Amino acid sequence: MDGNILGLGLPIGMGLAAIGSGIGLGKAVGSAMEAMGRQPEAIGQIQTAMIIGSAFIEALTIYALVVTIMLMGNI
């Protein structure tokens, strides 16, 4: 019984993590592009913050993938 629930929950959880990451990256990059358009003199600072933020967002998705792979052994 537990294996069936885990077998259903893992792909759903990974999918939600991927969707959340995509939405978060879209909003972050979109806001950064808007800020760069409004303040061209601050492009370097905005771009650095955007890249660091994007790395953190992607890291959360990679953590979800690692947990999914680790838990696949319990199915």
Image (cartoon, rainbow, N blue to C red):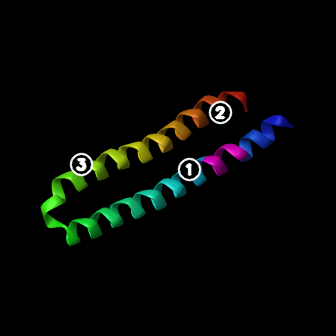
Examine the rendered structure and indicate whether residue 62 appears above or below residue 12: above
Residue at numbered disc 3: 48
Circle nearer the N terminus (2, 3): 3
Q: How far apart are marks 2 and 3 (CA)?
A: 36 Å
Which of the labelled discs sits on residue 17, or is there none? 1
In the displayed structure image, the side of residue 48 where residue 27 appears, left or right: right
Amino acid at pointer 3: Thr
Q: Distance between the residues labelled 2 and 1?
A: 16 Å
Q: Helix or strand or loop: what does disc 3 sit on?
A: helix
Which residues are drawn in magenta? 9-13
Q: Are marks 2 and 3 in contact (CB under 8 Å)?
A: no
Q: Which secondary structure type mostly characterizes the magenta part of the structure? A: helix
Q: Which residue lies furthest to the right in this view?
A: 1
In the depicted view, which residue is nearer to us: 42 or 5? 42
The answer to if 21 sits in the magenta stretch is no
Circle nearer the N terminus (2, 1): 1
Within 10 Å of disc 1 (Cα), the crowding (few <14, some 14-19, many 20+) is some
Discs 2/1, front? 1
User: x and y percent of residue 63 in the render?
Assistant: 51, 36
Residue at numbered disc 2: 72
Within 10 Å of disc 2 (Cα), the crowding (few <14, some 14-19, many 20+) is few
In the depicted view, which residue is nearer to us: 66 or 4? 66
Quadrant hosting residue 71 = top right
Discs 1/3, front? 3
- Residue at 34 percent across and 66 percent down: it is 30
In the displayed structure image, the side of residue 1 where residue 68 appears, left or right: left
